Image: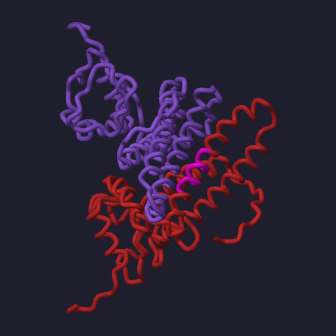
Chain colours: A purple, B red
Amino acid sequence: MPALEKVRYRPVPVRDLFLEMKNLSELMIDLAYSAALFNDRELAEDILELENRVDTLDYLLEMTIMIAARDAHDAEALAGVSAVASAADKISDAAADIAAIVTQNIGVHPIVSQVFEKVEERLMQAKVSADSSLVGKRVGELDLAARMGVDIIALRRDKDWIINPQKTEHIRSGDVLIVRGVHSGIKEFKELAEQKSRRRGD
Amino acid sequence: MPALEKVRYRPVPVRDLFLEMKNLSELMIDLAYSAALFNDRELAEDILELENRVDTLDYLLEMTIMIAARDAHDAEALAGVSAVASAADKISDAAADIAAIVTQNIGVHPIVSQVFEKVEERLMQAKVSADSSLVGKRVGELDLAARMGVDIIALRRDKDWIINPQKTEHIRSGDVLIVRGVHSGIKEFKELAEQKSRRRGD
């Protein structure tokens, strides 16, 4: 875990902070179940990082709301935003609790796996190799939903997360893609993302 | 809110308790966003009831785990189940916090609505009227996904909740259906569920 830095106020629209908190908290629950099911340490560590990010967003949001509220009327109007943001933070904490089972090697009981496996659609992460045919392609161009029944729900590029990447987003070598879809589709996609260059005759 | 009763141990398989907790907690988040977005008091009250139910399930689960664990090995194996169940409980608490915005008339700031509206698919609840053509039909028979792009994700019958009802489940008059789908589809479905008998010439 990185050293915690003091969160300093900077002006960011409340809407943007709030939207990112909501999207992240929902994504994190899905990721946490996947991390536990597949005992995926890397994914679990990503979740703990995202949890820090949601904490930071929550601080920024609370500070922004304080500055925005000038009278009792504003305060009443904004109390609901603060309440929903706290709920998103609580959800992300819960996701981190699930991820901690993996990072602390507590181990996932077969009961947990059985229940998580009931989910028809699965999540998977794949790191795009330099030789992958995905490199340089736009997300929309891949037509993944129609071709293999999968959907890129998030993309990690170095330390940045892009949630629900736009169709125009270009995929780069080294991107970590979080994909949701049917079992056969995500397997096919992982091979495509992680493919090595093949010589003729291989 | 109903008076709280003492939760007494009764033997229920851990897997069943755990599966219901996970499903309910996920459903509750979706329901909570819908309740806040549409300022739907009835739905918000349902969520507070479901939160009580998840609390009860969590108690039962913890008691069952205690009884099941006979030695250190069992305890280690079951610690993960307890951790995930606590996370599901935390998620359901967060959903109840969001629902409380509606029941306590805190009001939903336009920012919250804007962000929740971003969600492409919406939830809606519809009470099946005695005259509805849905009465007596099986869920599978309706072929809702193909016909109008909607899906029945839960069904409340008196005090019971049926999550992800089976295709063979018969719809009864008075059932409250929670439906997820595209805007046009859920509107069409609501009319179908709540339709009054029409006389010729109306």
Residue placed furthest toward the right: B70
Q: In this view, does A159 lie to the left or right of A166?
A: right
Q: Is residue B70 left or right of residue A41?
A: right
Chain part drawn in magenta: B87-95
Can residue B76 be seen by looking at this rendering?
A: yes
Which residue sits at x=63%, y=60%?
A: B53
* Residue A68 colored in magenta in the image: no
Which residue sits at x=67%, y=47%?
A: B14
Q: For the stretch drawn in magenta, what is the main secondary structure?
A: helix
Q: Position of residue B201 (x, y in %)?
A: 20, 92
Q: Which of A6 and A112 is in front in this view?
A: A6
Which residue sits at x=51%, y=39%?
A: A55
Q: Position of residue A70 (x, y in %)?
A: 44, 57
Q: In this view, does B174 lie above or below A88?
A: below
Check the picture and name the quadrant holding the N terminus of chain B: bottom right
Q: Where is residue B191 in the image (x, y as percent from the top left)?
A: 32, 75
Q: Which of A16 and B24 is in front in this view?
A: A16
Q: Quadrant of residue B65?
A: top right
